[in-house]
Amino acid sequence: MEHHIHSESAFLVGIFDDEDVLMSGVKKIRNSGVKIHEVYTPFPIHGLDDALGYSRSFMSKAAFLFGLTGFTCLITLMVWTMGFDWPMIVGGKDYVSIPVLVPVGFEGTVLFSALGMVATFLTVSNLYPGKKPFLFDSRCTDDKFVMAIDLTKNKLTPEEITSIIKNYGAIEVSTKLVKAGDLD
Amino acid sequence: MSHVTSSVRPPLVTGGKTYGDVTEDICRQVEGKPTTLWNIAFLISLIVLGIGGYGLYRVFWFGIGEWGLNKTVGWAWDITNFVWWVGIGHAGTLISAILLLFRQKWRTSINRAAEAMTIFAVLCAGSYILMHMGRTWLAYWALPLPNTFGPLWVNFNSPLVWDVFAISTYLTVSLVFWYIGLIPDLGTIRDRAKNKVSKVVYGILSFGWDGAAKTWQHYENVSLVLAGLSTPLVLSVHTIVSFDFATSVIPGWHTTIFPPYFVAGAIFSGFAMVLTLMLITREVFGLKDYITIGHIESMNKIIMLTGSIVGVAYITEFVIAWYSGVQYERYAFINRMMGPYWWAYWSMMSCNVISPQLFWIKKIRTSVVATFILSIVVNIGMWFERFVIIVTSLHRDYLPSSWAMFAPTKVDVLDYLYTFGFFFTCFFLFAKFLPVINIAEVKAILKSSSEHVEEHKTVTSAQPGFQARPAFNKDVE
């Protein structure tokens, strides 16, 4: 098998049909010295990211920063418009009174936080309307769990890797050639 | 992954479903031709939308003089319906956000439809805001935009401006939450699509979802944070809506109990509407294995709880009106009970306080027919609650010379019909073209909370390399 075609990479694709088998398999497969490119599943499996050695998601940090931005923007807007740009007494209330700032300040925080975080998520995950996904096996959005192993980044031979992942529960193993750019 | 199975809890998914079955069952109505029942229901909604649309045209063209408002009763059906629709929307966010934070697995079968209901209900509420403005084309004046009239800004002291921020944020965040939740399932439909149009449309809508573990990790984080943001948001929205009344000086409105009372009422009516819709959906689409009696019972328990909270709020209002010693306050409440709108008050009391108490009886709370009837009764009761608060508080002014009654005009009725037509048209379109149940989330609870557990026992233990983790022991014993 040719592993180093210039514009193509060869991947070994293992199919699992049970999430628990996959979960216990992932750690052992990695311990056996196999580098896993990615695992594709039809639903989120808690703990799979740890098993694959992924670092923690930074989405909550993004949400916090965007929220802070939203809060600052809205409070600034209110203080500036009511206190400086067009100060006006309405119903005997102060130009700028703190309780008045709470509802709009809060809504602004939530709005910026949610939209900012979701935009970050879509950007980081490279998801956008009309994007054509590259699927190693289309059953990964139905009922199968798909493990992709980049042969060009592994020292073990395909036969050795096949034997390891079969031993740890893969029900099918096949090879797939991927053009450069397909996985972007 | 938490596989905590309990022999005490009934399964959430019945019928021994596998992952493949879940995909198949839920995608069936999206992929198949619309059924006759769907066609009839959709046509009726469209007709109602069309007839109601005439009312919308009257208001937009001739203004709100078309409504039965007068100098004394300056707010009536418009705000009643606005608050009612916003309230209905709240159950969706509650189910998807608060129950997610509380790790309630039973939410997975109903959250998608409830979130869709939220969006459509908030749009209906929004249409009342637009109508109520009279000059709808100037609706943007409610936003703090630099304008051509000099440095004139919206009045941030006004709860009506807070409403603008609350409702638009609520709609936007709910829409985003709902759509992000849809993406993985749209990916599933895309990969199963047979015809060209479906392939293209679901291909665009699914954003290139591939189910990578890294994406799921971010996705789950995003869902959790959105739930964390939506939880105070849903509480804030109805709190702010209640400020529209509570910050005024009208007897019967000027009350500090309004925020929690309105929130409880919103959840109460929202769950009732979710039940009305879900009972129809499970029947029409054959989803009884996913929306089980257990789900219906859980929702009924929430209705019972929030109905009781609402009942306590009604009584508290009375006690405080008496305790305040303010004669106008006392009069407002006695007038509600025994004045010209006594029928509205007692309809509210019997529908909201008495009827949900029937759910203490297990036979009633697990009966589909009884639940369906009571869910409608609760929604009628909650409409009357808003009507009672708004109209009965206004129709008796401080000056007896200003006392007046309110009677809706045809346009009032048509506008209300329009929102029903719009809501059901949207809901039927959603139910036909998008998965009504969250496929990915149901699959995620399948092992721990379905009848499939028993069947699965033999499969997994036969797998090579399988090692059960402690929490899963019950399944592999």
Image (cartoon, rainbow, N blue to C red):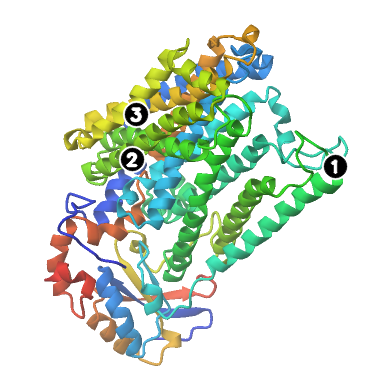
Is B65 on the left or on the right of B293, as rendered? Answer: right
Q: Nearer the viewer, residue B23 or A43?
A: A43
Q: Residue at x 29, y 67 (%)?
A: B2
**Three-letter amino acid code at disc 3?**
Val
Question: Badge 2: how crowded within 10 Å, few (<14), some, or many (20+)?
Answer: some
Measured as percent of width and height from the top left, residue B235 is found at: 50, 45
* Residue B408 - label: none
User: Mark 3 sits on what residue?
Assistant: B353
Q: Is residue A116 visible?
A: yes
**Is B364 on the left or on the right of A25, as rendered?**
left
According to the picture, the residue beneath numbered tag 1 turns out to be A86
Residue B429 appears in the figure: no
On residue B305, the disc is 2
Badge 3 crowding class, 10 Å Cα cut-off, few under 14, some 14 to 19, many 20 or more, is: many
Q: Amino acid at mark 2?
A: Leu
Please give the chain letter of the residue carrying mark 3.
B
Amino acid type at circle 1 is Trp
Under tag 2, what secondary structure? helix
Closer to the eye: label 2 or 1: 2
Residue at horizontal 77 percent and vertical 35 percent from the top:
A90
**In front: B197, or B284?**
B284
